[in-house]
Amino acid sequence: MLPATSVENIVTVVGIRFRPAGRIYHFDPQGQSYRTGQYVIVETVRGTEAGRVVIATKKMAEGDLSDPLKPVLRLANEDELRMMLSFKSREKDALVQCARHVAQHQLPMKLVEAEYTFDGSRLTFYFTADERVDFRALVRDLAATFRTRIELRQIGARDQAKLQGGVGPCGKTLCCSSWIADFGVVSIKMAKEQDLPLNPSKISGVCGRLLCCLSYENDNYIQAKQLMPQVGTMLDTPSGWGKVVSINVPKESVEVMLESGVIIQVPAGRADEQKQSNQGGCGSCGAHKANGGGCSCKSSGGGCGCGSGGCGTKGKACGSCSVKQKMSHN
């Protein structure tokens, strides 16, 4: 009896973005074809809104969708685009007026941005605050002033940086305001993995949180370190035996401290070869071939780490672990 196979449904979608560098939402084009750059009117959970097409009409598996599909109502016409630009130009003035009302009510909140919908049916104010704010009286005053539906949204420090924009420590436009759609997980462990100084001023962004870019190369650092000699490994360098004290992934090298206390830099590839060439020592007690191939462990043959009691084949390698032995002649 043949096993039952499930066929995944394929749906037609179009990708819409409502803010620059904002999250991309998928909508049902209702049989229409839309190109990137076009503005469309869509139905959302917050009402009717205008968005910009960033992903042209395409097909995808229904299981890949994170939210139920809402319909694209129509292509935005010229009157709607002019109206959208008109309300966009009023946002700065609305923010100033809202700041006056906040001061009158003496509320502990910092306004970040004002945003109109394309038809002016809703005005949203974004703000930051250290604690929960009771702004019910403020909303009533704002509704009487602007004669439209008012929403106030409290956001975090990262979202504030995304809305306001700015320049990061690298001298470039903030990643969050230019291309990052969703904030990923960033931890202090990533800074440690990349051997960065754990100084908050060095690894924090303008938002006061850990830099988003700490996650960009973290996986590469982890993979590179797995292929390089670990800290504490003993290496035979041209200058003598030494211990690995640090790893430099960008330079693909390791720092080795010699017995004399001098620290030298050895290319990772060469260090790995030297490490491999010294694997002829005992695998149990760590004795190197530079010591004559002998070992201090209980293996009577010396040199092999298979635990079989040494090699019984004169002048040849051990049959279990293939490590060559230095046999004594009577």
Image (spheres, grey):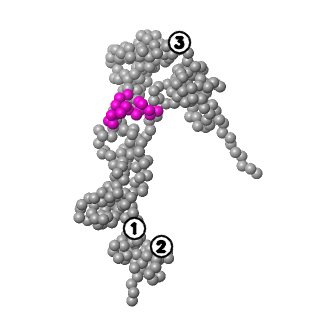
In reply to whether residue 14 is colored magenta, the answer given is no
Mark 2 and mark 1 lie on one chain; the one further toward the N terminus is 1
Residues 78 and 159: in front is: 78
Q: Which residue was labeled with disc 2?
A: 321
Count of numbered circles on the image: 3
Mark 1 and mark 3 lie on one chain; the one further toward the N terminus is 3
**SS for callout 2:** loop
**SS for callout 1:** helix
Residue 50, position as x, y percentages in the image: 52, 20
Determine whether 67 is above or below 143 in the image: below
Q: Answer yes or no: is residue 233 visible.
A: yes
Residue 34, position as x, y percentages in the image: 59, 25
Q: Nearer the viewer, mark 2 or mark 1?
A: 1
Q: In which quarter of the image is residue 240?
A: bottom left
Say what amino acid the circle numbered 1 marks. Ser
Local packing at callout 3 (Cα closer than 10 Å; few below 14, some 14-19, many 20+) is few
Check residue 195 in the rendering and tell me which mark sits there, or answer none: none
Check residue 79 in the rendering and tell me which mark sits there, or answer none: 3
What's the magenta bit mostly, secondary-structure-wise? loop
Local packing at callout 2 (Cα closer than 10 Å; few below 14, some 14-19, many 20+) is some
Residue 273, position as x, y percentages in the image: 39, 63
Check residue 277 in the rendering and tell me which mark sits there, or answer none: 1
Residues 155 and 284: in front is: 284
Which range is magenta? 165-181
